[in-house]
Image: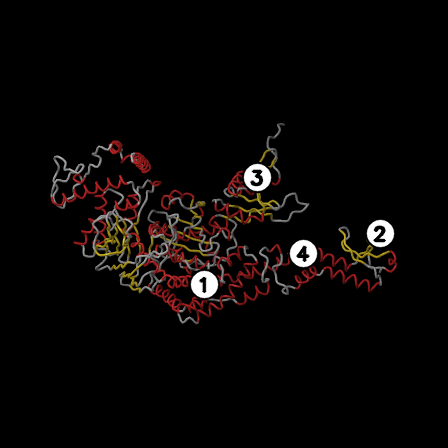
Amino acid sequence: MAKSNAKKVTPLMAQYNQVKAKHPDALLLYRVGDFYETFGEDAVKAAQVLGITLTSRNNGGSDVELAGFPYHSVDMYLPRLVRAGYRVAICEQLEKPSKEKKIVKRGVTEIVTPGLAVDDQLLEHKRNNFLACVAFGRGRKDPCGLSLLDISTGEFMVAEGSEDYIDKLLQSFQPKEVLLSKDRRKQFEKQFGDRFYLSPQDEWVFTDDYTTEKLLKQFQAASLKGFGIDDMHVAKVAAGTVLHYLETTENRNLQHITRIGRLASDRYVWLDRFTIRNLELIYSPHDQGVSLVQTIDKTVTPMGGRLLRKWTVLPLKDLAAIRRRHEAVRTIVQHPPLLQDLNESLQQIGDVERLISKVPLGKVNPREIRALSRALCAMEPIRQLLADSGSEVLGGLGRQLDPLPDVCAAIDEQIREEPAVNLSKGGVMADGFDEELDELRDITRNSKNRLAAVQQREIERTGISSLKIGFNNVFGYYLEVTNKYKKVVPPEWTRKQTLTSAERYITEELKVLEDKILNAEDKILQREEELYERLVVWLQDYIQPVQRNAAVLGRLDCLLSFAKLANTHRYVEPEMDETGDIAIEEGRHPVIERQLEVGEQYVPNDVRLDPEDRQILMITGPNMAGKSALLRQTALICLLAQMGSFVPAKSARLGVVDRIFTRVGASDNISSGESTFMVEMNETASIMNNITDRSLILLDEIGRGTSTFDGISIAWAIAEYLHNNGRAKPKVLFATHYHELNELAESLHRIHNYSIAIKEHGNRIIFLRKLVPGGSQHSFGIHVARMAGMPASIVDRATNILTQLEQQHIGQEVGETVAITDGAPAPNAQRVAPGSLSTEAMQLSIFETSDPTAGRIREMLDQVSINSMTPVECMLKLQELKEIAEAAE
């Protein structure tokens, strides 16, 4: 019989392999005694990410990679693994080791992924940690569904709509992890890009019946009509899939997920993903950039910080709701003592929303429960301050607060004032609450006194004056009697040992006391654990009331933040109406004005738009003059106002806008094969197809990604369309370098020309950053190039070329010869009729020169086939040309 070549696997590794097989896509932390160990490929990954030593162990004749760390260091190492993009499965010992068992029972108790983080080390206090799920409709025209869950707070939301709407929400809420069906991955990445951490799920999960059953079970409801999502079929599939995912990742204690909300698109201002990016609302693409939310966030609670981010990307459209927020902010601004008192009280609250969510998850520690008590105690003064504020809105918030005195009393009675963080360390439960615990603690504190009391009683009872109590590891506690007194030893004493000069005895009382003394520490920990777990289970009945309190305090914190902004930075209350007008006096950019150096002052500007007379402002002026800042500040002022904030201006009368669109700058989307110009046109087309009467549109340098004539033509046609489409009259700020567009104001009465003022001083220009009536006729690009440090030879050559172009343009206007070589009319030049545009006539022979470098560059350009080149090849060729020019300087 042939010998088997199979290598023997140790029992430990056999158990490990069984667990690992159930979680092949996770990095498995396997508890062995006081360490979490990783094996094989997991060990190699862990060692690289954590910087720990990679070793090996022998397993049936072969070496297996091994890397581990102490179990008490998991809070330090686990966040690093998750941030590195790993799913981490934590396998614990489920029973205590004993001599009788060769191997203890183990099992995965938790799977941590980027979207399922609940530990503080993995979370940002003022940002939600959303797990998202995207469910696609069956047909191309069917809506998509989106669900968003923050397991650390219990916040659960769904939305349904077009792929563009779902894209906008993904950009706004920035989930840490996205679930999707395995067969839809390519479709997802094509539509939403590759910027998300994806967790594909089996296709069968995305079914109506299965996911609806999950939702009904979670909310213990017969239907979902009461949640307002019953008609959102694809969104329900997305939400149910999230609950399924929680089960598969060992997250089954979800009592804090008590509600599910609907993100209705008709309630909020439409901000597409381009606008969210261009206005830098929640993040800045620049390394040293600052976002709007970073600038305006003066909240003091994590709930307020998280809510402010939502308010920033979800500005209100309902005028009454906007005015209620303004009324609350006005009251706080007008009463500084109220602001100070509320702010001081809120600072005592902490993150009660995430704290109460840890209760059902079994993650709450004793100090956090104490923090919950302090937070609830601080709510009563807040409620009283709001009731006395004189504001209906603030008073309404106060009436929604419930300080839960029963919870405060129970925690104060049961938990020590300064308990240990770790329950296993003891010293958690309060004295005087539990008789059994008090007795055990008394034994440990007074064991010597109790033994001395036993000794004294026995001396008095027996008359043995030399009686002593001792202890050894064999007999435990004993009574020692010298030979002189052994005849008077009571008969109920049991002799255990005979010495040369003495006898040792035990008594029933001493053995009982010994058992209590020796096991008191373990029993104290066991009893504390029982009492603590009982309290935690009891607190689960108060999850919803605490969550409601957290929501109210978050809203109050945001309103206080707006009031602080108003007081500190001279923000004013905007006058809101339904007219559709925008009238801003001395408006300022809320972010830029805060980034200026000491001594600098932001130059404010007036902006007035209305759909009947001043629908479109055509704004010209040089680069760096402030056109883009003016466009953005107008949108940000409108957005701040509809969030409920006061605004950075001297005064503002604003009609409610329903959509804000921006077309500001662009870059190649090389991975999708899209050039700068294609990106620009995609964004612009989206705007043109979605305009309404209440839209605010910001267009910055439309058409700059193509040739001059194409660009002017497209920009001209877009401006005409916005004016003449007959469908809607959106308010438009149109910044451009194409001075030809100034002519539109002569024939289209709702277009008005403006420019950013500058002052020329010799060859220098001074930016006055002031919006003034009338169009500019110069771009001053060469001046800006000089300011940027461009080599003088390039600046001089550009000036020469510009002179030729201007002469050529004058020639066109008067019908003169226009073909120019190097400053002189070319032979056989064509004549152009006044006002006509001829591409051939506008050609400029800038390379007809004796400069050998220019000649070489021309030769290289003659060999280039632009239509057959990729964007990357174009950039490489441009770099090569640039290096040639730099070498010739």
Is 276 left, or right, of 468 in this rendering? left
User: Can the viewer see residue 751 in this picture?
Assistant: no
Instruction: Give amino acid for label 3.
Output: Leu
- Would residue 138 be seen by someone viewing this image from the given angle? yes
Q: Which residue corresponds to mark 1?
A: 553
Mark with earlier residue (2, 1): 2
Q: Quadrant of the N terminus?
A: top right
Residue 259 location in percent, x, y? 45, 59
Q: Amino acid at mark 2?
A: Leu
Q: Which residue is mark 4?
A: 521
Q: Amino acid at mark 1?
A: Leu
Q: Tell me which amino acid carries mark 4.
A: Glu
**Mark 3 sits on what residue?**
66
Q: Secondary structure at mark 1?
A: helix
Which circle, 2 or 4, is nearer the viewer?
A: 2
| Mark 3 surroundings within 10 Å by alpha-carbon count, few (fewer than 14), some (14 through 19), many (20 or more) | many
Q: Gap between marks 2 and 4, in whole Å?
A: 32 Å
Which of pointers 2 and 3 lies earlier in the amino acid sequence? 3
